[in-house]
Image: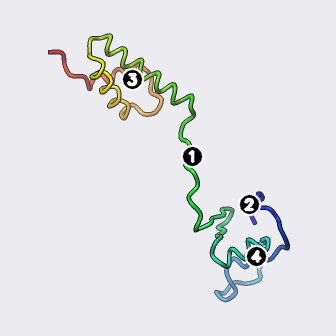
Amino acid sequence: MPDARMPFRGGLEIHHLVPRADGGTHDPSNLHLRCSACHRSTHRGTLVVDGEQVVRPDAPPPPRERTSHVGSRLDEAIVRTQARDALVGLGWKPNIARAAVEEAMSHVGREPALEDLIREALRRCPRPG
């Protein structure tokens, strides 16, 4: 079994990656050593080993990886707030400033510089009447 975290509970068995019935041979490149439980699971179809990847077809999908660290989300929130405050300081109402910053965020990418976010948000603010 390529996953060394799997507990070993019993004998080892040799598994043919390409079954003999499908033309597989006893060549070492076609053989894979598995514990008894994993070998049975493979033949039942409840465990699939593809190279170094182990997949359980009926298992729920793994949890999504977090795309950002808490610190970077906090940094982003601070930059958003600073940009909004800058626009309010220039005379725009808080709701207009907030909406402009939110819209600008989708155009400046992740972890934008404050100046870039303000510049992009200003493009989205209505011209003073």
Residue pointed to by mark 3 = 116
Query: Horizontal placement of 5 versus 71: left or right?
Result: right
Q: CA distance from mark 3 to mark 4?
A: 57 Å
Q: Quadrant of residue 104?
A: top left
- Work out whether residue 27 or residue 10 is closer to the camera in this orientation and state it: 10
Q: Earlier in the sequence, mark 2 or mark 4?
A: 2
Query: Horizontal placement of 37 versus 114: left or right?
Result: right
Q: Earlier in the sequence, mark 3 or mark 4?
A: 4
Secondary structure type for disc 3: helix
Residue 22 percent coordinates (x, y): 64, 86
Amino acid type shown at disc 1: Glu
* Quarter placement of the N terminus: bottom right
Q: Residue furthest left?
A: 129
Secondary structure type for disc 1: loop
Residue 31 percent coordinates (x, y): 76, 76
Residue 113 percent coordinates (x, y): 45, 23
Q: Earlier in the sequence, mark 3 or mark 1?
A: 1
Residue pointed to by mark 1 = 65
Dot 3 surroundings within 10 Å: few (below 14), some, or many (20 or more)? some
Residue pointed to by mark 4 = 31
Q: CA distance from mark 2 to mark 3?
A: 46 Å
User: Do tag 3 and tag 4 residues touch (Cβ < 8 Å)?
Assistant: no
Query: Horizontal placement of 91 versus 105: left or right?
Result: left
User: Do tag 2 and tag 4 residues touch (Cβ < 8 Å)?
Assistant: no
Residue pointed to by mark 2 = 3
Q: Residue furthest bottom?
A: 21
Q: CA distance from mark 3 to mark 1?
A: 28 Å
Q: Tell me which residue sits at (76%, 72%) in the image.
A: 37
Secondary structure type for disc 4: strand
